[in-house]
Image (spheres, rainbow, N blue to C red):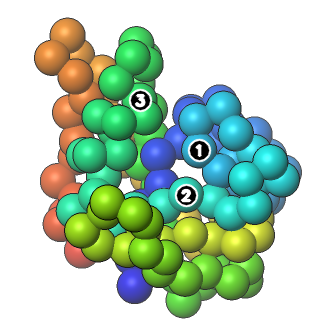
Amino acid sequence: MRIFHIAEPADWGAALDSGRYSWSTRGRSLDAVGFIHCSQSQQVSAVLTAIYSDVDHDLLLLVIETELLTSPWQLDDVPGAADPFPHIYGPLDIDAVTQTGPLRRTTQGFVLPDLADLADLA
């Protein structure tokens, strides 16, 4: 299964240097939260709106292949959400990220890459 995670470019750059990514969500570490927040493709836009709407710079969308994860993951029901959210219960190995896509910030909000294209290329 392919899942997605929104990342700060600097955090992803540090992960490329260290070999592991340990950020759960905006400004919160894996250690603080206990898992890494991810999304299914139909959830990315809503997460951007709910969590990142006041961010004034570009972000990255990580495409994650769950079969390449060494940390456990699962789909968890979240109250009020139509679909369960994927959560990774440990560090994200950079090798499980098969592609990154830009989340460009404009005056109207973020411009998402075509998620179907990202998933097809991953």
**Mark 3 to mark 2 CA distance (whole Å):** 13 Å
Numbered tag placed on residue 52 in the rendering: 3
Q: Are marks 3 and 2 in contact (CB under 8 Å)?
A: no
Give, as a three-letter code, the residue at label 1.
Thr
**Mark 1 to mark 3 CA distance (whole Å):** 10 Å
Work out whether mark 2 precedes mark 1 in sequence or the reverse, and give the earlier one: 1
Q: Pinpoint residue 18: horizontal percent, then vertical percent.
A: 84, 51
Name the residue tied to disc 1. 25
Give, as a three-letter code, the residue at label 2.
His
Q: Residue at the bottom extreme? A: 67
Name the residue tied to disc 2. 37
Q: Residues within 10 Å of mark 2 (few under 14, many from 20)?
A: many
Q: Nearer the viewer, residue 101 or 73?
A: 73
Q: Nearer the viewer, residue 77 or 2?
A: 77
Q: Quadrant of the N terminus?
A: bottom left
> Quadrant of the rendered structure where residue 119 is?
bottom left
